[in-house]
Image: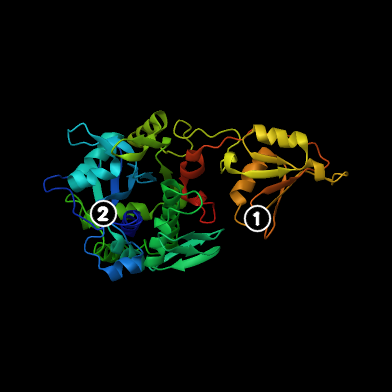
Amino acid sequence: MLRLATALTLLTTLVSGAAWAGPPSPGDDRSAPGARGTNILVVGIDSRTGLSKAEKDRLHVGGAGCNCTDVMMLVHLSQDARRASIVSIPRDSYVEYADGSGVLGKINGAYARGRGPLTVKTVEKATGLRVDHYLETGFTGFEQAVNGLGGAALCTDKHLKDENSGLDLTPGMHHADGNGALRYVRARHIERPGDLGRVRRQQRAVSDLLTRLTVEGALADPLAAAATARTLLLSVRTGTGTDLADLVRLGTAFGRLGPERTEFATVPIKTFDHRVPGVGSTLLWHAERSRALWEALAADRPITGDRRIQPVPESPAPTNPAGIKVRVDEPAVAAALLAGGFLVTDTSATAPQARPAGPPLIRYAPGREGDAATLAAALPGARRQVVPGHDAYLDVAVGARTVTVKQVTYDRNVAEGAPVTADRLGCLAAP
């Protein structure tokens, strides 16, 4: 049971924050499971209502809220309860509201127009899926839930700092309380800024927490699980069609799932900065890929490995070559990398007359592992070396071995939101 209370609570709490504003309206009974599995919508509302200045300062959530959903996660539990798929829906997704007005806007704005009920109906309209359960939480709800679960494990292979959220996380493994975890999942102004990178960190935090709770046996005892659910329900609100018995039933099913049977994904995006007068910058879903995603969930199929949802390029790049500055000491290799989209400086004039034995060597500064991996994908067989104090360039020293330069493909959806099982969503992976 705790799994649902955890998976959903954490999912809801990872929703970057919300002052919870209420469940679907009375009579909107969505407790009956769907014909093909069960869908749970978890949201968090960006609102500072009721928070004192001291609380805002402590949680690092100054400024005005929008009274809108900050993050959404749609959780699908398969009909046989042997698989869970957790799909993040970016808050700036451009959709039509399900209030009969014909108005289009950011999906997070549905809450301000019609609270929980319209949020549910808008997600149903956009995805074609029925929502069976609805959960919602807030900034303090997130903090309390994480504290109640014994904290969260956070880890990173690079220094993550974001003044807006208050995050300052050094490389390595950390045990964080609710406040620290909130800063981690809210950070948007670090490497790979914006919602997709933040959403992937949220997914990673959920995955790591669920794994820890499973290992600790927190999901094994139904009585203990029910007690945990009651504790979590102090900070997480449910829709009118969802009660403790539902949480116990769903949580028991979640508790039997291993990491290899829990999938995470983000809705595939086609346009990342679609400008709409009066609305601002929005996200347009990739029509074919997102349709394939919703169809897979409707048919109760796995979403990982489905190439209709996320076609994997022959040579995928974890970062965009267009933003990588490279110095290369061999003209032909420099020209080929330049043609492949890298920002290349030819340093062959100062290259050694005698090439060292072996393949090319890539030297780079700490924290540039993603860019180094992209460059290595373009130079198959290249060695990599971290050099403390290195500048903003990646240096390629071409060796005596013949070099083949491959074209790499950067797809932001693949790099930051492709469907992946929890056992492959390592916390040390690039954010």
Q: Is residue 26 above or below residue 57?
A: above
The answer to which quarter of the image holds residue 281 is top left
Along the line of sight, which residue is nearer the eye, 48 or 270? 48
Residue 160 position, x and y percent, is 51, 59
- Say which residue appears at 56% left-offset and 41% top-offset: 320
Mark 2: which secondary structure?
strand
Q: Which residue is outermost to the left?
A: 27
Q: Is residue 225 above or below residue 338?
A: below
Q: Which residue is outermost to the right?
A: 354
The answer to which quarter of the image holds residue 279 is top left
- Say which residue appears at 28% left-offset and 59% top-offset: 138
Residue 35 in view in this figure? no
Residue 331 position, x and y percent, is 77, 36
Label drawn at residue 136: 2
Give the crowd class for mark 1: few <14, some 14-19, many >=20 residues within 10 Å: some
Residue 216 position, x and y percent, is 43, 65
Residue 326 in view in this figure? yes
Q: Earlier in the sequence, mark 2 or mark 1?
A: 2
For residue 163, side relative to residue 137 (left or right)? right
